[in-house]
Image: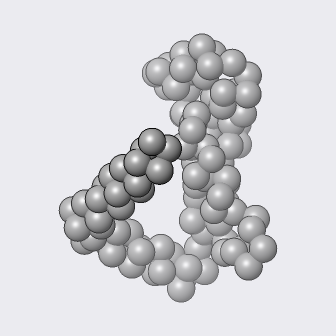
Amino acid sequence: MVQDVYSYFTQEIGNLLEKIVHEEKLNMEKASDIFAQVLRNEGFIYVFGTGHSMMMALETFYRAGGLVRVYPVFDLSISGFNGAFKSTMLERLSGYAKGFARVN
């Protein structure tokens, strides 16, 4: 039973990844070209995330062997660390990003 569930989920995850690559290949290539151009021009790649997407941003910077010119833009107020309800309300607050950008 456990093996059946494992096989089902690994198959479904594989199918989903194939679908994403097939449908988003051009967009992923465009994004990689933009990143490469930014780095060639000695620019920075800014990463940001709220909630669970913050984990993706955390994975991109300050990693051994990783890109040095990745700059995180974090606001722990909109992370789940300070409460899910609070972060949800701040994510929905019109103008919050402008205020955050001004202070940082």
80 vs 40, left or right, is right
Residue 6 in view here: no
Is 20 located above or below residue 50 in the figure? below
Give 57 or 70, whichever is nearer the viewer. Answer: 57
Q: Quadrant of residue 69?
A: bottom right
Image height of 82 relative to 73, above or below:
above
Q: Residue at x 68, y 43 (%)?
A: 74
Where is residue 104 shown, x and y percent of the image? 70, 42
Q: Residue farthest to the bottom?
A: 40
Q: Residue furthest left?
A: 23
Dividing the picture into quadrants, the one containing residue 85 is top right
Q: Residue at x 21, y 62 (%)?
A: 23
- Residue 31 position within the rendered picture, expressed as x and y whole percent measured from the top left: 38, 69
Q: Residue at x 47, y 50 (%)?
A: 3
Q: Please, is residue 73 above or below residue 87 in the view?
A: below
Q: Residue at x 66, y 27 (%)?
A: 80
Q: Is residue 13 left or right of residue 18?
A: right
Placement of the N terminus among the 4 image quadrants:
top left
**Does residue 10 appear in the picture of this structure?**
yes
Relative placement, left or right, of 29 versus 72 is: left
Q: Where in the figure is residue 34, as x and y percent of width and height?
A: 41, 73
The image position of residue 89, as x and y in percent, is 54, 16
**Figure colour scheme:** one colour
Tell which of 1 and 74 is nearer to you: 1
Q: Nearer the viewer, residue 11 or 2?
A: 2
Q: Is residue 1 left or right of residue 65?
A: left
Camera-side residue of 3 and 39: 3
The total number of labels drawn is: 0
